Amino acid sequence: MQDEELGHDDVTVEKAERIEQLDGKLSSDFDDERLMHSVVENDEQAVKDGKLLCESVDYAVGSFTPDLMFKEIVENYRNAQRLFGPTIIRELTGYGSEYVERNLKMSEFREEIKRNIEKNIDRLKRERLLGKDGTVTDEGLRLATLVLYTEELDHIETHGMGRKDVKERSHYGERTDAVLYARQRYKDLDLRASVMRAIRRGHATIDKGDLRAVGRRQHGRISVIYALDASGSMRGQKITTAKKAGIALAYRGIQDKNDVGVLVFTSKIELAIPPTQEFMLLLSELAKLRAGQETDIALAIESSVGQFERGAHTKHLIIITDAIPTRGKDPARTTLEAASVARNAGVTISIVGINLEREGEQLARRIVEIGGGKLYRVAALDQVDALVLEDYESLKTQ
């Protein structure tokens, strides 16, 4: 049977499209693979150890020294809670924080938790998660990073955060409703919509006028910098939550083929990674950052401007903070001036404020007004990642 009898037209291939192949692995190192398998397979002890090591970074625990930690718990338990947090106390003593506090007066109980602290720290050293001096090893940091990543990924996927609709995405844009087929890629032919259109028009066969294609809504290139306040007031659960929100943003942004950078600031710039597609770099650096001292938001804004590539694409800065700036003679004025300079350079600014006081909220509101962004007020820490993703998603509609 000839092509003419079937009604086929000759097809000329004007452009060949290369098929993308995604490959690679976390690491070829045996220890890294072992850690990854432990976390992915939900090894209970490995996950607990990873959480403990995450907390040691977020609470700025310099080293795990059994005698000193036991002494702090026994002599000033409220201070021990502030220094170590609930996870470290639970995993080292074997008991929940409230139970420990209620039973500290019992000599037998004190002896038991002393033995448990020594035993658990010795085990962490044998497993090379802690060094001989009690400091977290590189392997310990990798385990902490993996646990932090898997926990946050499970969280955002379980709750479907950020995206209010779920549409097919590709390099060519976001899939929308079907449109008239007119020289789009053959891959964009929407067979179901074409058949339905032919039926509605009473056609026994599909003719050229029935053909429909997948609509694509194009988004311009987006570069985002996640600026994390790592001042002393962010120590503990605040910085843990902020890290997880940064991981969520990096995962979502890079998944969308956009670039994400990280800037960590105190009274100085602690870390600056320009917008990139290197997810593992962002993940590892976020996981190991610790809280510092003062807050200099103006410096963070000024530094971010130079991190963006030049060009007519969306450039956006998301600042996570729990305080007003405390550095300089007139930090508020300096910060507003920096926001104005950034806006003139094409950078928009949003702020996620964690339990901001009245003065801090007023300043934050002025910053985002100048910066053309949004202010998100956080009352509960578990809201942070959802708000960060909400801000990122809003960039696509601008």
Image (cartoon, grey):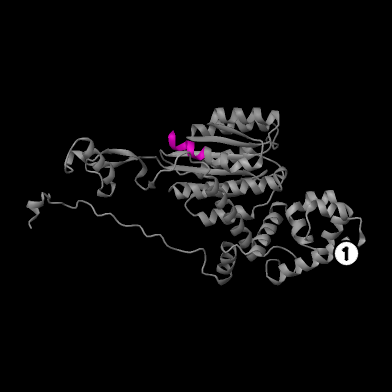
In front here: 290 or 17? 17
Q: Which residue is mark 1?
A: 111
State the image coordinates of residue 276 (x, y, percent, origin top left). 48, 50
Which quarter of the figure has residue 91? bottom right
Q: Quadrant of the N terminus?
A: bottom left
Which secondary structure lies at badge 1? helix
- Residue at screen point 26% across, 46% down: 191
- Residue at screen point 68% across, 40% down: 295
Q: Total number of numbered labels?
A: 1
Residue 189, visible in the rendered structure:
no
Q: Is residue 320 above or below residue 77?
A: above
220 left or right, relative to 110? left
Label 1 is placed on what type of residue?
Glu
State the image coordinates of residue 14 (x, y, percent, origin top left). 20, 51
Q: Is residue 215 above or below residue 122?
A: above
Q: Chief secondary structure of the magenta span?
A: helix
Which quarter of the figure has residue 200? top left
Q: Is residue 237 above or below residue 398?
A: below
Task: Give the magenta range.
Answer: 391-398
Residue 148, visible in the rendered structure:
yes
Q: Quadrant of the C terminus?
A: top left
Is 249 magenta? The answer is: no
State the image coordinates of residue 116 (x, y, percent, origin top left). 80, 65
